[in-house]
Amino acid sequence: MGYQSESYQVVYAPGDNTGVGTVKVLLDKDGIHLYGDAQVFTNGAIARTPVTQQFDANAVDIAIWTATEGVWQVESVSETHTVAGGSGAQVDVKVCTGTQSPSQGTTQLGAVIDLTTAANTPKSPALIASPTHINPNDRVALDFGGTLTSLQGSITVNLKRIA
């Protein structure tokens, strides 16, 4: 008689006990899921990936990730700055298609992130009701505004593959 379970889990960690490089495998009714250091894989394909970008007072609008296959969506965003920006400093997360610049992309946030607030206070802004589908060659970009004087921080955009 065999053991019956909803899922099976296998964990591999290197012999140095750091946990770096740890891979966890989960087998369940939905398939095989591999959890690596930065990405989650489902049935051999990447299903989630975080993209982190540091920024400072010299930050310019920039594409931080380009889809190469599949269809993706922004799942969540988090931002923390250690030094606040100047007057009106803000950042928006946008999806750009074709030749769109970051300022022309479609916003993914319910409201821009205010970069003038108290330092070391993590923010996780609400997303728009229906995040844009990110197709191959579309980009996720940061659109900065206001005076960024002295600004220091980072933003993480968590992406989820939907097809």
Image (spheres, rainbow, N blue to C red):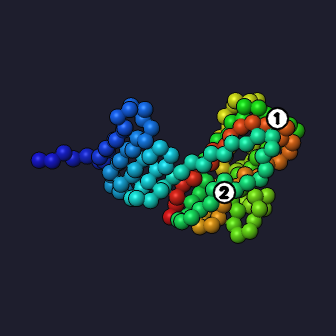
SS at badge 1: loop
Q: 154 above or below 163?
A: above
Q: Position of residue 109 (x, y in %)?
A: 70, 50
143 vs 54: above or below? below
**Residue at left offset 66%, top offset 50%:** 127
Q: Position of residue 64 (x, y in %)?
A: 66, 53
**Label 1 vs 2, first from the N-terminus:** 2
Percent x, y of residue 163: 50, 64
Q: Residue at x 42, y 47 (%)?
A: 35
The CA distance from mark 1 to mark 2 is 25 Å
Q: Give the farthest residue toward the left.
A: 1
Identify which residue, 6 or 36, lies in the foreground: 36
Q: Would residue 111 be found to the left or right of residue 78 on screen? A: right
User: What amino acid is at disc 2?
Assistant: Val
Q: Residues within 10 Å of mark 2 (few under 14, many from 20)?
A: many
Query: Which secondary structure, mark 2?
Result: strand
- Whether residue 81 is visible to the viewer of this picture, yes or no, is yes
Instruction: Give the answer, above or below, for where 21 lies relative to 107.
Output: above
Quadrant housing residue 106: bottom right
Marks 1 and 2: which is nearer the front? 1
| The label number, if any, that marks residue 150 in the structure image | 1
- Which residue in the structure is indicated by mark 2? 140
Amino acid at the residue labelled 1: Ser
Q: Position of residue 81 (x, y in %)?
A: 72, 35
Compare residues 58 and 126 and report the one nearer the observer: 58
> Residue 94 or 38: which is nearer the viewer?
38
Asked whether, in this view, residue 83 is left or right of residue 11, the answer is: right
